[in-house]
Amino acid sequence: MSVAEGPAVGAGPRRQPPPLRRNRDFLLLWLGAGVSVLGDRAATVAFPLLMIWYGGSATEAGLVGFAGLLPMLLVQLPAGVVVDRLDRRKTMIVCDVAGLLAMLSVGVALLNGRLWLPHMLAVAFVEGTAAIFYRLSERAAVRNVVHPDHLAPALSQNEARARAAGLLGQPLGSSLYGAARWSPFVFAAASHLLALVSLLCIRKKFQTERREEPWRLRAEMAEGFAWLLRQRFLRAAISLVAVTNVLFQALSLALVLIVKESGGSPASIGFIGLVSGAGGIIGALTGSQFVQRMNPGTVMISIFAVWSALMPVVALTSNVYVLAALFAGTSFAGAVLNVMAGVYQVQITPDEMQGRVGSVAGLLSSGASSLGALGGGFALSAVGSTGTVLAVGAVMAATLVTAVLVPSVRRAKRTESPHRPEPPGSRA
């Protein structure tokens, strides 16, 4: 992978930027997006509860879940083109308005005692689509809102925010549903409203200046693929991470079976998820420290080594506390890896291609995750939880060896992109 030279050093001492906590626009963006993600998570948890307990159909619950995930396959690539073409703040505003209206429509329908499956399918699809556009736009916008020196801490805080929202969204969604079946959706609508207000208060631009050119959807999506495939480290890293995503799907299924076979309860799964989520938050908050001190290849190999050591141990115990500690360790390492990958990709990608590259990377790294759940189910039926987990550990060890042997991973260095802009306006 060719690495461009860093920006030229100007004459005179370099002025240190103010702390990130004093960056008003980043704080507004971070808080608004965090509230929006939390509302979406609470609604996502409430959808199956609504369809099963109120609608009375597990099949309909599955259909609504499928409708919410379908945009990951249908929308993600064209969304990257749109994010690179249109004003990112306006795109996020449209997403918040769409989410607000969709969720509010569910709340109003339930307050009137109505539940209509096509309505729920449409809402889930709209919310899933808006979330993709919103996430790609926000991630691409961060480097235009913060000082270049603060990119790693900013993305680290974003990762921590996402994991905290996932951790809190589960109990929040179920608790709100228990209080009133319409309340999770009204809460989600209110979260979009708060996020919308925060966006309107941000002063800085979310992208560099663009030239007006005719739309070429297929060609521009292909440009995103082609650019990413030319980056040797990113290409290898995404391929390896895709394998680990499949493995973790199988490992999560095995965990449920291990707890069930040992006489545990669903509450035990919830406890493990809680501790695991806390590990992920800690990893996200400290991830920027690893990124700023270690080369990306070293970070990846180290994390793969941690996973290779922890995964097989899951097969050797049914103690809930030990399992919680093991999954907290894997989540900690995974959060650090996400921060490293995010910082590296954002730094080296030209601003006008951030959306496309992000969408391609997301599709390639996570698109095969469903195969992990499918394969894990077959493996658990065939060889049981112990055999499945040991097989997962063996594949993880092979992935670690591959990462060590691939030169583009082993020799990957930290890089500063010449495309990285100084934030418009003041240094912050």
Image (cartoon, rainbow, N blue to C red):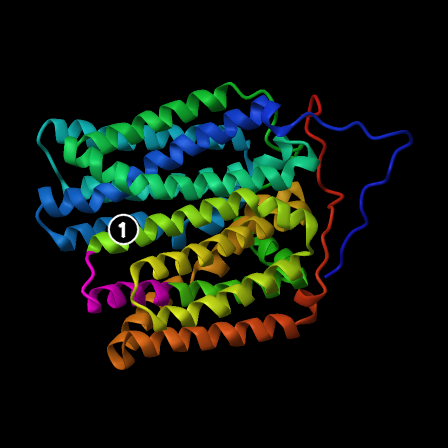
- Residue position marked by numbered label 1 in the rendering: 270
On the question of residue 220 being in view, the answer is no
Number of numbered discs: 1
Percent coordinates x, y for residue 318 in the rendering: 29, 67
What amino acid type is highlighted by mark number 1? Gly
Q: Nearer the viewer, residue 219 or 417?
A: 417
Q: Is residue 91 left or right of residue 119?
A: right
Q: Residue at x 51, y 74 (%)?
A: 397
**Helix, strand or loop at disc 1?**
helix
Q: Looking at the magenta stretch, what is its main secondary structure?
A: helix
Which residue corresponds to the image point at 80% horizontal and 27% vertical from the top-left? 15
Q: Is residue 415 magenta?
A: no
Residue found 39% across the figure and 23% down from its top? 194
Q: What stretch of residues is rendered in magenta? A: 249-265
Q: In this rendering, does residue 102 appear at all?
A: yes
Residue 248 image point, x, y percent? 40, 63
Q: Which residue is rendered at x = 59% and y = 31% of the image?
A: 206
